[in-house]
């Protein structure tokens, strides 16, 4: 659910639009934890907050809202990179009906806006799926109250979605239309809000037993991978299917087995990422010595690419549950999980980085992201655009929201206990975190005071704190954003005044772009708009000076 700054051209367009929008809050993030930016303080409650990048260093948050008192609706608010709320006070309604919204999911439309899908009881007693697209200026770009994704008989629920690369989205959901058990269906909605596949969706899996908790991961051909927890054998297995841009299935008819066998094998949404070259990286919890965390890299045909099957990310005593995964920007992944009671009856959060080849790069069984006692409940994770990750959680006792940045080496950057984003003023629940593309993030959470709940947000780290570490001394380089789309900046350090070259190479070793930096020791920045014409995939960016070289991998996406 998180993107980097994106293309300079697109960001400038979004910034111009932002200047014309009504501004509802002071354009300054609070400097400490004594306050936060309010996104919604309307009466009654909010829940299920989710967020996406606006492509300009800010974020769009969506949530279920009970201000009507009789039912939940869907609202959204955009907050700029400087902490200004840009849309109507307390948010914009994506629908204005009197029936109940049950659950929702959202994704960036890759044009500064968002696509939101939700289940609702518009045709009671069944629940159907609807979707809306909201633009950078807060306008609703699809028909009022949402377009129908599926109105098949019985219930459609647990939606998940991913961008299709052309301004639309691929949606998957659990579906009880057969009246016996739950299956998985999917639909592609184009940028104009028109369903592209069969009415009410195409079949992903209709095997016997229940198939639940679907999760969509995009791939480079306009389609996507769909994972789910499958109960056809009586145990819970994790299965996967690849669906093409036209809605055709490309793996085994009722799904490829990612992890199976006795006990529980499965995960909650948030368990996979695209590899940038048509494959997918997956993480899940499964039965080992206890509930442990595993991972594997699959190509587009579901061939396993990492040597161990699967990679044991954490097999420490006690249970590790609910893993989240984000890309590290160089072909690997960072996983984090919660409810890890290996040290005591307390519950802690750990993280691990898996390299491109499947090796574990941090401490055995992971790095503990906070040394605080008590219980921490992991809520969200996003990449930091520099090879690390930013995690958000709330703590118990106290209820305060916190965030931590773990860099690519596994070092905690925001203190041993992370940043307290807000002094306790009630209980915290339903957090979302969106990367700002510069090593920081915007974190939103629901604050419950015992009577009503408000939606607040804060920037991490606090204003005036520089989140980005300088390049190390010697020949070095880093690409930002990574993954990138239509423009990537390469920041690098030269050791002396000698001539140097920066080359972009595809995986076949062919040079696809190059530059000669201005001679001179120290840090420099070069922009590569050529990224816009490159095919999606993984590229090697190599810096050479006086016979020495340094290289990194950059993922280009669409």
Image (tube, helix red, strand yellow):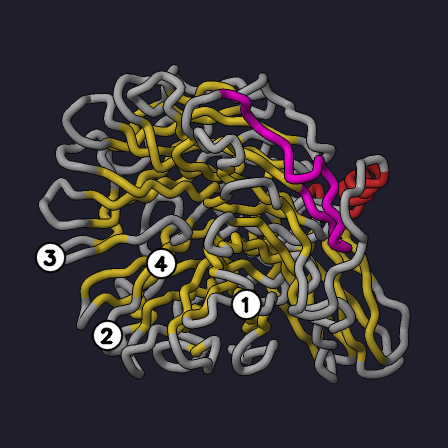
Q: Residue furthest front?
A: 451
Mark 3 vs 1, N-terminal side: 3
Badge 4 element = strand
Q: Is residue 85 magenta?
A: yes
Mark 4 vs 2, N-terminal side: 4
Question: Crowding at label 2, few (<14), some or many (≥20) Cα neighbours within 10 Å?
Answer: some
Mark 4 vs 1, N-terminal side: 4
- Snapshot quadrant of residue 24: top right
Give the residue at mark 3.
Answer: 262
* Cα gap from disc 3 to disc 1, whole angstroms: 43 Å
Mark 2 vs 1, N-terminal side: 2
Question: Crowding at label 4, few (<14), some or many (≥20) Cα neighbours within 10 Å?
Answer: many
Q: Give the x, y percent position of residue 549.
A: 69, 76
* Magenta-drawn segment: 78-97
* Cα gap from disc 2 to disc 1, whole angstroms: 30 Å
Give the residue at mark 4.
Answer: 283
Q: Nearer the viewer, mark 4 or mark 2?
A: 2
* Cα gap from disc 2 to disc 3, whole angstroms: 18 Å
Q: Nearer the viewer, mark 2 or mark 3?
A: 2
- Snapshot quadrant of residue 342: bottom left
Q: Nearer the viewer, mark 3 or mark 1?
A: 1
User: Does residue 554 appear anywhere in the picture?
Assistant: yes
Q: Which mark is residue 424?
A: 1
């Amino acid at each position: 659910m998180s993107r980097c700054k994106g293309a300079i051209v697109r960001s400038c367009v979004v910034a111009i639009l932002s200047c014309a929008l009504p501004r509802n809050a002071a354009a300054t993030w609070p400097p400490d934890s004594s306050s936060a930016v309010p996104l919604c303080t309307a009466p009654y409650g909010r829940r299920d907050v989710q967020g996406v990048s606006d492509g300009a260093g800010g974020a769009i948050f969506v949530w279920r809202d009970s201000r009507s008192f009789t039912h939940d609706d869907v609202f959204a608010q955009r907050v700029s990179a400087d902490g200004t709320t840009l849309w109507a006070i307390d948010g914009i309604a994506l629908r204005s009906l009197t029936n109940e919204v049950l659950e929702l999911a959202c994704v960036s439309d890759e044009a500064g806006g968002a696509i939101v899908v939700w289940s609702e009881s518009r045709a009671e007693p069944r629940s159907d799926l609807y979707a809306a697209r909201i633009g950078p200026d807060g306008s609703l770009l699809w028909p009022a109250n949402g377009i129908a994704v599926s109105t098949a008989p019985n219930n459609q629920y647990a939606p998940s979605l991913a961008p299709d690369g052309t301004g639309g989205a691929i949606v998957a959901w659990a579906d009880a239309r057969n009246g016996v058990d739950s299956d998985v269906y999917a639909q592609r909605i184009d940028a104009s809000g028109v369903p592209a596949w069969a009415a009410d969706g195409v079949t992903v899996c209709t095997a016997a037993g229940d198939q639940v908790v679907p999760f969509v991961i995009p791939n480079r051909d306009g389609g996507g991978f769909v994972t789910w927890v499958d109960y056809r054998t009586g145990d819970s297995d994790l299965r996967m299917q690849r669906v093409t841009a036209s809605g055709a299935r490309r793996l085994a008819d009722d799904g490829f087995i990612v992890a199976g066998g006795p006990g529980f094998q499965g995960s909650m949404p948030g368990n996979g990422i695209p590899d940038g070259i048509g494959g997918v990286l997956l993480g899940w919890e499964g039965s080992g010595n206890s509930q442990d965390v595993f991972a594997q890299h699959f190509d587009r045909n579901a061939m396993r690419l990492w040597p161990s099957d699967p990679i044991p990310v954490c097999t420490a005593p006690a249970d590790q549950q609910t893993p989240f995964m984000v890309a590290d920007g160089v072909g690997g992944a960072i996983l984090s999980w919660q409810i890890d009671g290996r040290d005591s009856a307390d519950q802690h959060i750990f993280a691990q980085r898996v390299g491109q080849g499947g090796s574990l790069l941090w401490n055995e069984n992971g790095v503990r992201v906070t040394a605080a006692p008590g219980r921490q409940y992991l809520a969200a994770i996003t990449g930091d655009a520099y090879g690390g990750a930013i995690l958000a959680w709330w703590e118990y006792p106290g209820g305060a929201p916190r965030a931590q940045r773990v860099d690519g080496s596994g070092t905690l950057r925001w203190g041993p206990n992370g940043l307290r984003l807000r002094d306790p003023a009630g209980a915290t629940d339903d957090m979302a975190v969106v990367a700002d593309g510069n090593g920081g993030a915007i974190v939103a959470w629901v604050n419950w005071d015992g009577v009503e709940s408000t939606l607040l947000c804060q920037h991490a780290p606090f204003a005036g704190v520089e989140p980005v570490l300088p390049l190390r001394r010697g020949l070095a380089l880093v690409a930002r954003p990574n993954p990138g789309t239509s423009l990537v900046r390469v920041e690098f350090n030269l050791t002396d005044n000698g001539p140097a070259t920066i080359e972009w190479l595809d995986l076949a070793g062919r040079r696809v772009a190059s530059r000669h930096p201005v001679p001179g020791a120290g840090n420099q920045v070069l922009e590569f708009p050529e990224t816009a014409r490159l095919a999606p995939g993984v590229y090697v960016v190599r810096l050479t000076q006086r016979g020495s070289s340094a290289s990194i991998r950059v993922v280009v996406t669409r």
